[in-house]
Image: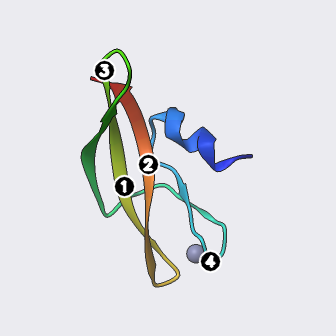
């Protein structure tokens, strides 16, 4: 399974980079607007901050056009 699939799921799921386990509950989430495409539409990403194995890592948990 490619990492890219997580971008479209919309639910919170990220894999720990150390042990590979799926972490479903982010400590924190925030939204980030991406660059506008040719038609001027921006993509809004939802980023989650996850913690596992004493490490924190970020993963995109949602994506939508704004
Ligand atoms: Zn882990």
Label located before the other in sequence (2 or 1): 1
At 35% from the left and 40% from the top, the residue drawn is 45
* Left or right: 29 in relation to 50: left
Cβ of disc 4 within 8 Å of ligand 1?
A: yes
Helix, strand or loop for disc 3: loop
Question: SS class of the residue under badge 2?
Answer: strand
Q: Height in image: 29 above or below 9?
A: below
Question: Does the residue at mark 2 contact the one at mark 1 (Cβ under 8 Å)?
Answer: yes
State the mark number for residue 41. 3
Up/down of 64 relative to 51, above or below = above
Q: CA distance from mark 4 to mark 2?
A: 18 Å
The percent coordinates of residue 9 (x first, y second) are 52, 34
Q: Which residue is mark 4?
A: 18
Q: Residues within 10 Å of mark 4 (few under 14, many from 20)?
A: few
Q: Nearer the viewer, mark 1 or mark 3?
A: 3
Look at mark 1 in the image and give the residue it sits on: 48
> Could you tell me residue 54's position as x and y percent?
46, 84
**In which quadrant is the C terminus drawn?**
top left
In the image, is the residue at mark 3 within 8 Å of ligand 1 by its beta carbon? no
Residue at image location 32% in from the left, 36% down from the top: 35
Cα–Cα gap, marks 3 and 2: 19 Å
Residue 19 image offset from top left, x and y in percent: 66, 75
First of labels 1, 4 by sequence position: 4
Please give the residue where the numbered disc 2 appears in the rendered image: 60
Q: How is the image coloured?
A: rainbow
> Which of the 4 image quadrants contains residue 38?
top left
Q: Position of residue 51 (x, y in %)?
A: 43, 72
Q: What separation in Å lies between label 4 and label 3 (alpha carbons)?
A: 36 Å
Crowd rating for badge 1 (residues with CA inside 10 Å; few <14, some 14–19, many 20+):
many
Q: From the Cβ of disc 2, is ligand 1 less than 8 Å away?
A: no
Using residue 60 as the reference point, say whether residue 18 is left or right of it: right
């Amino acid at each position: 399974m490619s990492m890219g699939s997580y971008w479209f799921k919309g639910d919170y799921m990220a894999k720990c980079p150390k042990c590979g386990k799926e972490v479903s509950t982010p400590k924190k989430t925030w939204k980030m607007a991406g660059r506008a495409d040719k038609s001027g539409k921006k993509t809004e990403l939802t980023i989650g901050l996850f913690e596992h194995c004493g490490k924190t890592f970020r993963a995109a948990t949602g994506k939508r056009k704004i």
